[in-house]
Image (cartoon, rainbow, N blue to C red):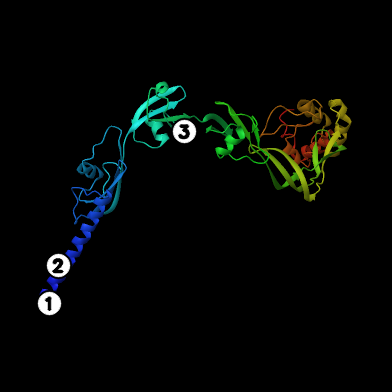
Amino acid sequence: MRQAFRALAANYRNLIAVGLLLTIVSFGLHTGRLPISPVANADNQRMVSLYVDGTKRLFATNDTTVGAVVKHTGIKLAAGDLVEPSDSTSIAPGQFNINIYRARPVFVVDGSQHFRLESAYQSPHLLAQAAGLNVYPEDNYKTSVITNFVATGAIGEQVSVKRATPFLVKVDGKIQTVRTQATTVGAALDSAGIALGLKDTVAPGTATPVIAGETVQITRVTEALATITETIPRPVQTVIDPTVLKGQTSVRTPGTDGHKTTTYLIHYTDGVETNRTPVQVINQTAPTAQVIVVGTKVIFAGNVEYWRPQVVAAATQYGLDPNMMLRIMQCESNGNASDVSAFVVDGQHPTGLFQYLPTTWIAAGGTADNIFDGSLQIQLTAKKMAAQGTKAWACQ
């Protein structure tokens, strides 16, 4: 009984399937919308909707590419016909759509140039490219049906190319080509997505008509607030001291720099600061002056005889021969207390009546500021000769 029941149920399902299939076929034949392909098979898993010549065909197929399906349908393709997707496109199981567009005569006009072609493209842009034209996204098109067959010498569809006007824009350190359908510079920049700041300048002006090939210069003008701390240099004061030898200087007071913190409104032109306007002084410290002492004392250059009284007094004090000291002085400096030798010894120049090296002079009890003091050189030399002799002076 169970086997008989299963067989009866199977037969019933088959009858329902056959009835449903007959209903679909009957509807398709009656409406003319669903012609069945010779390759139709109820076991196929790929259902194709093919649109061609204003009709739709719906069928199942075992073919796995668009090209194979079109071939099996027996549809004849003429030159210029377009199949979408392409012949090599794979067909996956499930629902799939194929469109066949028939080529038609098209007349493409680009200014004084005219082109005749057969094409299935619907887009005016693609039709212009198919005619061999180099077109741009900013170009526009007008599509119409040819009515004056005599003037054009053609029938079918006409595509007229309205070229965008090309010009150059110099902005932000770059030069770029812009194409536009706009008639003024301002509208062209806006359509190209080039934004203008509130203070930016444009030359020629935004109301100027667009001219092919011209250069439009955009100058970026911006302003920004900035708080800046600046150094105020310390002033320098000079004090004359007649007790210090001429040529000698010293810093009596070092002084300090001042500081000033200010908020400025800074103006920029194409990113370069062109001006700044102070808005508010936040903090300020005044500088203190640097004081420099400049000596003006001049030691008489003299000669050996000028110094004789002082030499005799110093030699007598230390038990020396004054003529010996005067002879060494004559040999060393000719009695010129300001003499600086051109010779260099250990990086130093012998200086003064008895031509001391600065380091030797300091070791003898002098300072860098009094090496030109003739009277002091006589006193320290007599003391040195009394203690060490005259071996330090080769010139005798």
175 left or right of 344?
left
Query: Which residue in the protein does label 2 denote?
Result: 11
Label 3 secondary element: strand
Reading the chain from its start, which is encountered first: label 3 or label 2? Answer: 2
Q: Nearer the viewer, residue 156 or 228?
A: 156
Query: Which residue in the protein does label 1 denote?
Result: 2
Q: Are marks 2 and 1 in contact (CB under 8 Å)?
A: no
Q: Nearer the viewer, mark 3 or mark 1?
A: 1
Viewport quadrant of the N terminus? bottom left
Tell me the tag on residue 25. none
Label 2 secondary element: helix
Q: List x then y, in percent, for residue 44.
A: 20, 54
Identify which residue is drawn at 20% across, 57% down. Answer: 22
Report the amino acid beneath label 3: Tyr
Q: List x then y, in percent, for residue 128.
A: 41, 31
- Spatial separation of the CA atoms under disc 3 and disc 1: 74 Å
Query: Which residue in the protein does label 3 denote?
Result: 141
Label 1 secondary element: helix
Reading the chain from its start, which is encountered first: label 3 or label 1? Answer: 1
